[in-house]
Amino acid sequence: MIVDCAIYRHGQRTEGPEDLSDALAEARAAGGFVWIGLYEPSEREFGLVTQEFGLHPLAVEDALKAHQRPKLEVYEDSLFVVLKPVAYEPESDTVSAGEIMVFVGDCFVVTVRHGEASPLAAVRHRLEEEPEMLHKGPTSVLYAIADAIVDRYLEVATELQTDLEEVEAEVFRPEGAARATPPRGSTASSGRSWSSAGRPGR
């Protein structure tokens, strides 16, 4: 699904054309760049983008299949970056990961998102409020996305640490410790455990 398409010139947004075949030409003519955002695109949808921007076939295959490791690949006239954002749901004690693939060229950015933990609307909005940043070109988008993902990792780590401290406080309260004492001959461990699926449990 194509979720957004805009051309940025001197840091200011203008709506991109409905026909993607005109997007790159319009961006170049304006002396700016185009940013196209896709969410779990079909082969047909991504095929249109691939044809217009000349994306490398191997990178395109990775972006469509997803389940890639974080990486940076440098091609002749573009970059391909795979990033892994995370999200934490305290109600279910679940950490989930998404994927964001970023194609960067001299006058284009194509972002491909997989999973619910990969929103970019806030990043785009924040950039559009900082035209001096957007004026630096397509790499400013890559920087802003990576920066937001790193910040979210730190936030999730803090949230997990807070939950662990709450569990620890509960276990080591006098009445909590009594409840947590295992019967003789049994084994037990306190704190939080992680399953192979990455789901922590109390």
Image (cartoon, rainbow, N blue to C red):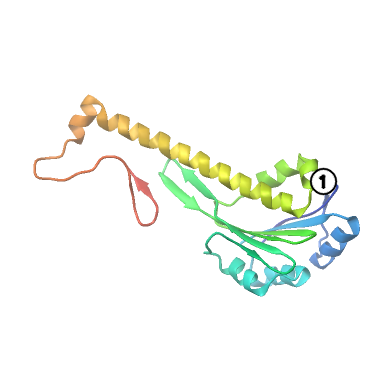
Up-down relation of residue 138 to residue 57 (above or below): above
The residue lying toward the viewer, choosing from 150 and 42, is: 150
Residue 195 x, y percent position in the rendering: 34, 53
Q: Is residue 120 visible?
A: no
Up-down relation of residue 61 to residue 105 (above or below): below
Q: What residue did someone put label 1 on?
A: 11
Farthest left residue in view: 184
Up-down relation of residue 17 to residue 45 (above or below): above
Looking at the picture, which amino acid does disc 1 mark?
A: Gly
Query: Tag 1's secondary structure?
Result: loop
Residue 161 x, y percent position in the rendering: 41, 37
Kindly identify the residue that appears in the image at 55 percent across and 43 percent down. Answer: 152
**Label 1 crowd (10 A; few <14 / some 14-19 / many >=20):** many
Residue 163 x, y percent position in the rendering: 39, 36
The residue lying toward the viewer, choosing from 103 and 48, is: 103
Instruction: Judge left or right: residue 21 versus residue 164.
Output: right
Please state, as top left, top right, bottom left or bottom right, where the C terminus lies in the image.
Answer: top left
Instruction: Judge left or right: residue 202 versus residue 160.
Output: left
Q: Is residue 47 visible?
A: yes
Up-down relation of residue 112 to residue 87 (above or below): below
Please state, as top left, top right, bottom left or bottom right, where the N terminus lies in the image.
Answer: bottom right
Farthest bottom residue in view: 57
Kindly identify the residue that appears in the image at 88 percent across and 55 percent down. Answer: 31
Instruction: Judge left or right: residue 121 versus residue 96.
Output: right
Q: How many marks?
A: 1
Kindly identify the residue that appears in the image at 42 percent across and 34 percent down. Answer: 162
Residue 56 x, y percent position in the rendering: 68, 72
